[in-house]
């Protein structure tokens, strides 16, 4: 090969290598331009989501500050925040509700409010004459007796005039009581002795009062007598009235070799205004959840001249 031909081949290779280098530089420039375009598009999109300097009303506010700025308050009073993920509302526990549930008034105040809610703080010291019917529930059916209840507030006593099926008043002799009549007398006496008339006096007697807090939306108070008896009372916090009370009396076989206490419970409802005093016109008695008797009053009058009638006062439960 001649020297001239060699020089031409060498020049061609050199020019070809330079061409390839220029082609690589062009490709690099194109890639750099594409990256810059993508960055600008992403920045523009982010600016559109965060109204910062582009907002004419907030031209002096930086974009970073706009992300963290406080938002409006929602109906529950929680503050909203505008973040890159959108509007977020923090979850705040209802501390006010917890505080309200823990705020329970002292037992002495609850007992005082019990008397006030009935219309007269000294209701247990007022005389009462009430009339109604007692229905006794038995497996064989129901038995109804007419009753007149006479209570002496000064003496703290109660007398029961029982009208039997023959229309006559019971004469006070135990052997003249009809089936279900003794059960009626015990029911009416117990709801008085251990119920509404006696609970307001608890703070002035030789008893121990325990505060059991709130159960099923009712205020629970346990009163323990010096002799060992105890009763649990439930008060309605909204009205401060006695909703029910219960106590254990005796035991019954629960299973082989085991015994369970017999629970008596009394519930009070249908409160009406009688001479300015709220009086329950419907009272029910349950034993281990089964209804035994119920009293429905038809009228109640306080501080009236009670009609005297000699009768034997039942012992109650």
Image (tube, rainbow, N blue to C red):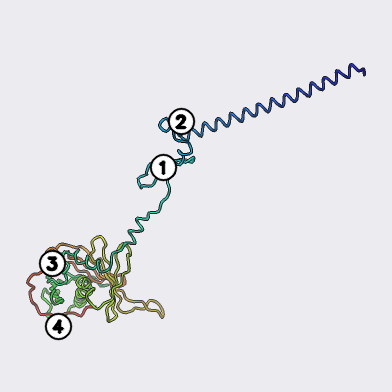
Quarter of the image holding residue 273?
bottom left
In the rendered image, the residue lying farthest to the top is 4
Q: Label 4: few (<14), some or many (≥20) within 10 Å?
A: few
Q: Which mark is residue 287?
A: none
Residue in front for this viewpoint, 81 or 232? 81
Q: Earlier in the sequence, mark 4 or mark 2?
A: 2
Residue on which disc 1 sits: 70
Q: Does 41 appear above or below 216?
A: above
Q: Label 1: few (<14), some or many (≥20) within 10 Å?
A: few
Residue at image x 37%, y 55%? 95
Residue 311 vs residue 16: left or right? left
Query: Alpha-carbon distance for marks 2 and 3?
Result: 79 Å
Classify mark 3: helix, strand or loop.
strand
Quadrant of the snapshot with the N terminus: top right
Q: Earlier in the sequence, mark 1 or mark 3?
A: 1
In the rendered image, the residue lying farthest to the front is 60
Query: Alpha-carbon distance for marks 4 and 1?
Result: 83 Å
Residue on which disc 4 sits: 173
Residue on which disc 3 sits: 300
Q: Label 2: few (<14), some or many (≥20) within 10 Å?
A: some
Residue on which disc 2 sits: 54
Does residue 248 appear in this view?
yes
User: Circles 2 and 1: CB distance less than 8 Å?
Assistant: no
Q: Position of residue 257 (x, y in %)?
A: 41, 80
Q: Position of residue 220 (x, y in %)?
A: 30, 68
Q: Nearer the viewer, mark 4 or mark 1?
A: 1
Residue at image x 42%, y 45%? 89
Classify mark 4: helix, strand or loop.
loop
Classify mark 2: helix, strand or loop.
loop
Query: Alpha-carbon distance for marks 2 and 1?
Result: 19 Å
Q: Earlier in the sequence, mark 4 or mark 1?
A: 1
């Amino acid at each position: 090969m001649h020297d001239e031909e060699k020089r031409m081949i060498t020049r061609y290779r050199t020019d070809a290598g330079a061409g390839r280098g220029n082609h690589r530089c062009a490709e690099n420039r194109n890639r750099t331009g594409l990256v810059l375009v993508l960055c600008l598009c992403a920045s523009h999109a982010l600016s559109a989501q965060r109204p910062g300097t582009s907002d004419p009303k907030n031209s002096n506010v930086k974009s970073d500050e706009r992300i963290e700025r406080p938002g409006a308050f929602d109906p529950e009073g929680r503050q909203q925040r505008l973040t890159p993920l959108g509007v977020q509302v923090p979850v705040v526990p209802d501390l006010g509700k917890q505080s309200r549930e823990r705020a329970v008034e002292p037992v002495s105040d609850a007992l005082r409010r019990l008397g006030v809610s009935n219309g007269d703080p000294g209701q247990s010291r007022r005389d009462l004459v009430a009339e109604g019917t007692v229905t006794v529930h038995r497996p064989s059916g129901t038995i109804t007796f007419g009753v007149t209840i006479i209570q002496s507030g000064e003496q703290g006593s109660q007398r029961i005039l029982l009208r039997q099926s023959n229309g006559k008043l019971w004469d006070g002799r135990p052997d003249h009581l009809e089936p279900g009549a003794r059960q009626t007398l015990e029911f009416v006496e117990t709801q008085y002795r251990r119920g509404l008339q006696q609970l307001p006096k608890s703070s002035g007697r030789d008893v121990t009062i325990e505060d059991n807090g709130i159960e099923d939306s009712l205020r629970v108070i346990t009163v323990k007598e010096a002799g060992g008896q105890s009763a649990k009372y439930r008060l309605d916090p909204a009205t401060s009235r006695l909703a029910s009370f219960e106590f254990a009396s005796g035991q019954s076989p629960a299973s082989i070799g085991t015994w369970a206490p017999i629970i008596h419970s009394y519930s009070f409802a249908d409160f009406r205004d009688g001479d300015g005093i709220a009086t329950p016109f419907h009272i029910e008695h349950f034993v281990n959840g089964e209804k035994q008797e119920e009293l429905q009053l038809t009228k109640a009058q306080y501080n009236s001249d009670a009609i005297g009638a000699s009768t034997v006062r039942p012992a109650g439960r």
